Image (tube, rainbow, N blue to C red):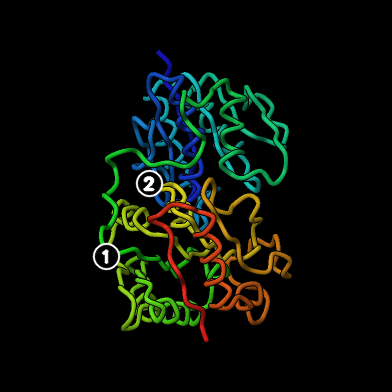
Amino acid sequence: MTRTLVVRLDSLGDVLVTGPAVRALAAGSDHLALLCGPRGRAAAELLPGVDEILCWASPWIDPEPDPVRRGDIEDLVDTVAAGRYDRAVVVTSFHQSALPTALVLRLAGVPWIGAISEDYPGSLLDLRHRCADDLPEAERALGLARACGAEPPPGDDGRLALRPGAWSAPTVGEPYVVLHPGTSVPARAWPAEGYRRLCRSLTAGGVRVVVTGAPDECSLTAYVAGEEGEDRGGCTDLAELAGILAGAQAVVVGNTGPAHLAAAVGTPVVSLFAPTVPAARWAPYGVPVAVLGDQHAPCRGSRATTCPVPGHPCLSSVTADDVVTALESLLGRAGTPDRRTTLRRIS
């Protein structure tokens, strides 16, 4: 009986893009546990292949870390040891090290550990995997799973996916486009005025617009929706948001978790993407995508959370007309009757 522990300790989108790797590892396991951070737990609950969820805030991964405390580490060691896992696979992004986590897993007695690591791991890893730069994050994680001897189950296309029955049914009614103006960090946000102008343009052309956002984004979603759009800000949990995104013709969103949630339910995405991280790695995966934003702006590759360039030119240069054009092209490429519409440009 093979008991596998997969570790992905960061945010919602990070957990979602790990989904194909999780499914591959689950196919060769009798039991699969996912160790995630608090920011990723809601996504972990939606993933196929997960039998057990462990949650721990990592001080070397979380963007707003607590101090390292001996007691917290010892608690995690005890929790992992109690699981009696046969193997662990530590999934990280290109800028993260798997080795602190591997050390904790070794202390917990996990006998076999695999991870991607550029640094010398000593005895911390049994499999030290290396991969090409600029792989999409989903492919990076799946490549690690394959190096660990796992393969996707028959019929698995390797795209992002949610567990059947774990999320709400798609919203019914006339076709609509979702605008999701919030982002996890300010540097990735298209200006709210752009979303407001886009909402007015789309609704003037007869397109139904639904605006979504987290509870702390209600003032933003109300501004974007105005009198013309439907404001759903703060009204949904992640499963309900998945349903709204699944029912949409397309989603307009920045580089943030709901972009990957849209990909997981198969909805085309206009990605307003700030180049602080590479779009080749982090653009929505496995669905039709139009990436907008100056990918050669001075902030490129900085991983900045607050824009370091006056005027936020990488995204402020994108106009509402640009988004309308991208939507028209994207929906034409999607090529399915329920995702076709005629969008009116701003005059």
- Tag in front: 1 or 2: 1
Q: CA distance from mark 1 to mark 2?
A: 19 Å
Residue for badge 2: 41
Query: Measured from the top left, where is residue 98 in percent x and y?
Result: 60, 38
Task: Classify residue 213 by image quadrant.
Answer: bottom left
Query: How many labels sit on residues?
Result: 2
4 shown above or below 259: above
Q: Earlier in the sequence, mark 1 or mark 2?
A: 2
At a point 51% along the width and 83% down the height, the residue shown is 346
188 lies left or right of 131: left
Circle 1 SS class? loop
Query: Measured from the top left, where is residue 169 in percent x and y?
Result: 26, 49
9 lies left or right of 100: left
* Residue in the foreground of this view, choosing between 67 and 270: 270
299 lies left or right of 316: right
Residue type at mark 1? Answer: Cys
Query: Measured from the top left, where is residue 7 in percent x and y?
Result: 49, 36
Residue for badge 1: 235
Residue type at mark 2? Answer: Arg
Mark 1–mark 2 CB contact (< 8 Å): no
109 shown above or below 101: above
Circle 2 SS class? helix
At a point 38% along the width and 81% down the height, the residue shown is 223
